[in-house]
Image (cartoon, rainbow, N blue to C red):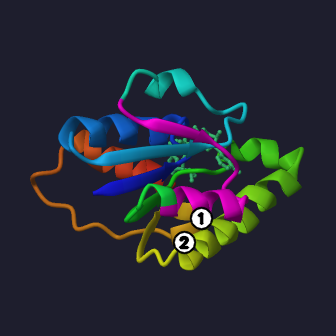
Amino acid sequence: MNLLVTGAAGFIGSNFVHWWRDRHTSDTVVALDALTYAAEPANIAGLDVELIQTDIADTERVRSAIETHRIEVVLNFAAESHNSRAVLDPSRFFRTNVLGTLSLLEACRQAGMVRLHHVSTCEVYGLHFYTLNRHHSAQEILGLLRSEGRV
Ligand SMILES: NC(=O)c1ccc[n+]([C@@H]2O[C@H](COP(=O)([O-])OP(=O)(O)OC[C@H]3O[C@@H](n4cnc5c(N)ncnc54)[C@H](O)[C@@H]3O)[C@@H](O)[C@H]2O)c1
């Protein structure tokens, strides 16, 4: 499978790239990242992964990357994720998280892509109600309740 991982030099994106590379050694993994202050490209250095430095809002370059590498799945981890900074510069968040995501979708549409996984937060997707059972540890249950602001 050929994957395009956006935000691949960020915290979760880079961990995902390592995770996927370890388990799917014959897949093509292309990393795309604007390399903002939040990026740590060293985290994916040395892997069998091509890194394309560009903004997800650059529809033309993203479409070209999808077509050139015959990408089948896009995983979007690119985001302005340090939410407290939005107080200082909200437009930057709107540009990447809203307009950038729209541009990425458009690039996928133009390239005839069928599958995109958009990674976001519970603030966007809402709370999930899990069925907890005896297999969950006390730590897991506490973590879940904390993440939902219930304790
Ligand atoms: N870190 C967490 O604990 C956590 C928890 C839940 C959800 N998430 C979500 O996961 C996603 C990734 O989070 P993260 O912690 O890895 O963020 P991060 O800030 O560590 O990484 C984001 C990456 O996206 C890149 N980027 C930013 N703007 C870009 C743009 N316009 N074009 C291309 N690349 C761009 C940055 O350079 C960076 O490498 C976000 O949507 C975040 O909300 C994160």
Judge by depth and name the residue closer to the eye, 2 or 125. 2
Left or right side of 44 for 38: right
Residue visible at 21% across and 39% down in the picture: 25
Quarter holding residue 60: bottom right
What's the magenta region? Answer: 48-67
Q: CB of mark 2 within 8 Å of CB of mark 1?
A: yes
Give the residue number, with chain letter if any, for mark 2: 108
Question: 10 Å neighbourhood of mark 2: few (<14), some, or many (≥20)?
Answer: many
Query: Quick check: is 56 in the magenta stretch?
Result: yes
Judge by depth and name the residue closer to the eye, 51 or 70. 70
The image quadrant in which ligand 1 is located = top right
Is the residue 103 above or below the residue 34 in the image?
below
**Residue 113 image position (x, y, % from top left):** 46, 74
The three-letter code of the residue at mark 2 reads: Cys
**Residue 8 image position (x, y, % from top left):** 51, 41
The three-letter code of the residue at mark 1 reads: Arg
Element carrying mark 2? helix
**Residue 19 image position (x, y, % from top left):** 29, 38
Left or right side of 40 for 67: left
Element carrying mark 1? helix
**Residue 14 image position (x, y, % from top left):** 45, 36
Give the residue number, with chain letter if any, for mark 1: 63
